[in-house]
Amino acid sequence: MATAYDVLVACCADDVTPLLGHMGSKWGSFVPGAIPAQDMVHLARSLMRHGVVGLKPEGRPIKGQKKEEYSKEFNAREFVAQATAHLGLSSAEAWQMTMTEFSGAMQSKFGKPETLPPAEEHDEAMLRLAEINRLRQYQVKK
């Protein structure tokens, strides 16, 4: 519960002592707030899962990393740069995005990894398309 408390306090700019509680005057005693301890754990878990704390979005895995793995660190600048470059968001909009929103938007734009063809299949299709386009240009010139 102490970790959940720390997460919630870190995520709030305002004083949330009435909701979460505080450390009492006796060493180690905790005075509970309006939110039950179990609810604090659920809230903190949700903030960490849907926030930007190391959860890699579903998508192409980083080379050498399994798809299911979590990142050991989170690079906020990289996250914002990707959101602005690929999703056309302003920097301010990107900074307000959660990792869950980012992941969903990237999947909407680029598709889920399992729906994408393998690289070899994609390359073959692109070569066929290039050949078809070359033949079309040759026929138009005649």
Image: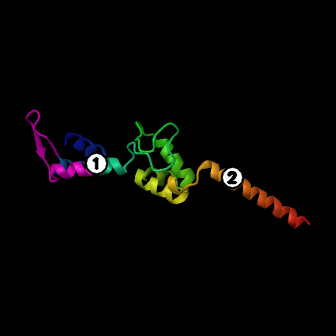
The residue under label 1 is 45
- Which amino acid type corresponds to the residue marked 2 in the rendered image? Glu
Question: Which one is nearer the viewer's eye here, 134 or 17?
Answer: 134
Tell me the quarter of the picture where residue 67 sits: top left
Tell me the quadrant of the picture where the N terminus can be found: top left
Disc count in the image? Answer: 2
Q: What distance separates the C-alpha of mark 1 from that of mark 2?
A: 44 Å
Instruction: Where is residue 74? Give x, y as percent.
Output: 43, 40
What x and y, as percent, mark residue 51?
37, 49
- At a point 10% along the width and 38% down the height, the residue shown is 29
Q: Position of residue 3 (x, y in %)?
A: 24, 40
* The stretch drawn in magenta includes residue 6: no
Residue located 73% across and 53% down the image: 127
Closer to the camera, 123 or 86? 123
Can you give x and y, in whole percent of width and height, for residue 34 in the image?
A: 15, 53
Residue shown at the point (45%, 57%) measured from the top left: 104
Vertical position of residue 74 compared to residue 138: above or below: above
Q: Which amino acid, mark 1?
A: Arg
Closest to the observer, 70 or 26: 70
Residue 33: in magenta span: yes
Kindly tell me whether residue 62 is visible in this rendering. yes
Q: Which residue is mark 2?
A: 124
User: Of all residues shown, which one is farthest toward the right?
Assistant: 142
Q: Residue furthest top?
A: 27
Within the image, what quadrant is residue 132 found in?
Answer: bottom right
The residues colored magenta run: 21-45
Q: Residues within 10 Å of mark 2 (few under 14, many from 20)?
A: few
Q: Are marks 1 and 2 in contact (CB under 8 Å)?
A: no
